[in-house]
Image: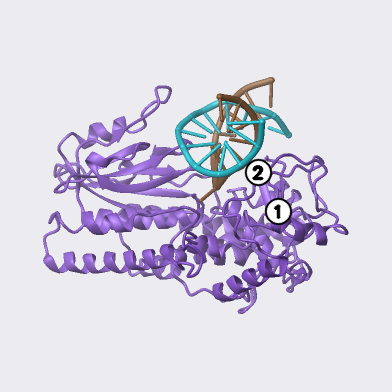
Chain colours: A purple, B brown, C cyan
Amino acid sequence: MPEGPELHLSSRFVKKVGDARQFAGKILERLPANRAPRLDDLNSRLGAAARYTITSWSRGKELMLAIKPLDLPETSKYRPEEWSIRFNFGMTGCFKFTRTDELPKHAKVCFTAVGEPACTLSFVDMRGFGRWTPTSDWSDNRGPCILQERDLFRAHVLASLEASPFSKPICEVMLDQRYFNGVGNYLRAEALHRLGVAPFARARDLLASLPERLEPGRSDLLHMCHQLAAEVVALGGGRRYDVPLDVLHELLPRDGVKEEGVEQNGLKKEVKRESAVQNGLNKEVKEEGDEGKEEVDAFEEWLQCYYQPGMKNLVDHQGRTVWFAGSPGPMVPKARKQRHESSKKADKQSVKSESSDEGSSPPEKRAKRAPRRGTKAVPVEDQAVTDRRVSSRGTAGKESAERTVKVKNEISRKTSTASNKAAGRKGAGKSTKSRSAVVAVLQKTERPSPGQRRSKRISAAARQT
DNA sequence: CGTCCACGTCTAC
DNA sequence: TAGACCTGGACGG
């Protein structure tokens, strides 16, 4: 699941658990035989009995989990850099907070909570591509966060256009975390699609004309990356992504580790509220007439391109599936390999409109399965989409040397801000920013509301019979 | 049963 | 630019 928004939601989740519960004892690593533990040092410092608290924050596709021991000897100062763990989620990482006797099968790193019922916060990772390292630094090869460092992210990309990766197709550069930290396969598809950008257009060509500062009310690819990430955060997360707040609701408030009832109550209330929101979104729309089996979740509804019927797909140069509509653009891989066949319904549609199209049906056909949730017959997304161009006003690329310096400076400044945070110096009033920036109000895109889209779909399906 | 596919990095020819 | 790293779900025979 995890792209920037999921990492961010996970960090909020971990923080919430950390606010409610204390932890104690060694951190348990459950590793395959071929992998060495990373937390032995930390554990030995922690000792078996020491209590500690946890907090968390994220940047792009990384999550930081910071531990604060409660009973450090007076002599030793708390140095957060010695007590932080940085996580990568790989393909399937997530955090869960469960009863200890119901530890998830693929729990890889476990933090034992104090109190009743006996609970464990665990990093769960089915495929095991996730990684963790004891450090309080973000990886130095990853750029600013698309979600929380919007302006810096923009500046950094625009300052880097001369770099060789930008000679590649835009869809491939968008997965390069040195520049698009937080973008993954679904975000790139959605961002490109919503602006009608051909995925295999040369990145530099597209980005060179973007203004350093976007005028209010306008959007472009860089802004879209941020905006869509924020939208997914607002939804509560991506595909099959469940931050188990409902479980939280049951397991958090009981243990009474926190002293004041006031705080307890405040927390309890907040958890409840979020839980309700979460449920509201996930359970959404019991389709009234037909069998009600179709439980459409909010994220599935939100997706317009990625994995959607009627969309085309190709395998990019890195072997990843790119979803798109319209023409693929000039830099299509030679072996135009397609992965999924559209569902039959959707296929009829696309075949119709494809014939003239440069980048349509792949030469070679293989047996494919329909995309899951194949019931969702969607008309090939309006032609208009293909005609819309990225808003490229603003003067063409400024001298980037100057930019580079400026941006680099700012990045390092920000980085040190991050370590301040780690240092627990909550700073003079600075801390307000992160929270509200994240929930920042989202500009409305001009796409139809979910309701409208649904009826669009239904009528399209009706047309086909 | 087998094959293909998956929201992501890494490192090694 | 391949692969390697993994588990498991969906689908085909």
Badge 2 and badge 1 both on one subunit: yes
Amino acid type of the residue tagged 1 in the rendering: Lys
Residue A320 image label: 2
The quarter of the picture where the C terminus of chain A appears is bottom right
Which residue corresponds to the image point at 44% horizontal and 67% vertical from the top-left?
Answer: A284
Q: Position of residue A214 (x, y in %)?
A: 63, 73
**Chain identity of mark 2:** A
Disc 2 marks a residue whose amino acid type is: Arg
A394, above or below A426, in the image: below
Residue A69 is drawn in which quadrant? top left
Q: Residue at x 47, y 70 (%)?
A: A288
> Is residue A107 depicted above or below A309 in this figure?
above
Residue A178 x %, y %: 59, 48
> Of A433 and A62, which appears nearest the observer?
A62
Vertical position of residue A333 compared to residue A395: above or below = above
Q: How many angstroms separate mark 2 from mark 1 (CA)?
A: 23 Å
Residue A443 percent location from the top left of the image: 55, 75
In the image shown, does A13 or B10 lie closer to the viewer?
A13
The x, y position of residue A91, in whole percent, is: 51, 42
Does residue A201 show up? yes
Which residue occupies 81% across, 53% down? A360
In the image, taking residue A230 as reference, residue A424 lies left or right, namely left
Disc on res. A344: 1
Q: Residue at x 31, y 56 (%)?
A: A15
Q: Secondary structure at mark 2?
A: loop
In the picture, the disc for residue A166 is none
* Local secondary structure at mark 1: helix
Q: Farthest residue toward the right?
A: A356
